[in-house]
Amino acid sequence: MFHRRDAISAPVPFMRRDMAKPADRAYSHYALDALELLGRLIRMGRIDHRMTAEDLAQRAGISRGLLHRIERGDPGAAIGAVLETAAIVGVPLFEADRGALAERNRGAGERLSLLPRAVRPAKSALRDDF
């Protein structure tokens, strides 16, 4: 289990210092609306299952504060925590059936294997007007 004290004492080598903080990022209205809806669905699922915020947070392995941020649709919440809380309270995200989800995931992997690994910007147009 990850503990907050681990994050404070251990440096994180893979994070770049010049990356924008979540508060500095601009999010589209669509993304913000979708996050708000997902947060509300998670809250409704928690209440329908008669779970307290403490119960769900403990089961998801997150803090109660993070759960409240998720339920408010905070775009800075970790996607893994959001997906885990949604799964616990039964909010369907992709496919209700795990087998169908696996099949869809397999199909996406096959399609990705056909696409180029990297995308490079298009070269500038030739100037042949000499």
Image: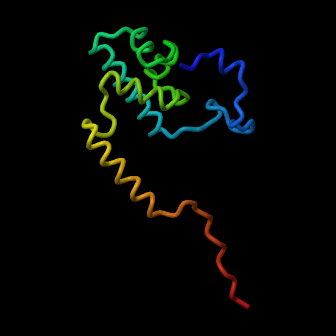
Seen from the viewer's position, the closer of residues 16 and 75 is 16
Asked which quadrant contains residue 89, the reply is top left
Instruction: Give how far across and how far down residue 118 sits, in percent.
Output: 57, 60
Quarter of image, res 15: top right
- Give the camera-side residue of 106 and 116: 106
Q: Is residue 125 left or right of residue 30?
A: right
Q: Relative to the observer, which residue lies in front, 117 or 19?
A: 117
Q: Residue at x 39, y 57 (%)?
A: 110
Look at 32% across and 39% down and name the residue there: 94
Compared to residue 87, the image places residue 15 above or below, namely below
Picture coordinates of residue 26, whole percent (x, y): 59, 38
Residue 95 drawn at (x, y percent): 28, 39
Quarter placement of the C terminus: bottom right
Q: Can you tell which quarter of the image residue 125 is in?
A: bottom right
The residue lying at 72 percent from left, 19 percent from top is: 9
Q: Give left or right: position of 55 versus 8.
A: left
- Is 63 on the left or on the right of 36, as rendered? right
Residue sticking out furthest to the front = 1
Q: Position of residue 36 (x, y in %)?
A: 42, 28
- Along the horizontal axis of the image, is 5 left or right of 52? right
Which is nearer the eye, 22 or 62?
Answer: 62
Q: Is residue 2 above or below residue 14?
A: above
The answer to whether residue 52 is above or below residue 96 is above
Q: How many marks?
A: 0
Instruction: State the colouring used for the structure image.
Output: rainbow
Residue sitting at 54 percent across and 38 percent down? Answer: 27
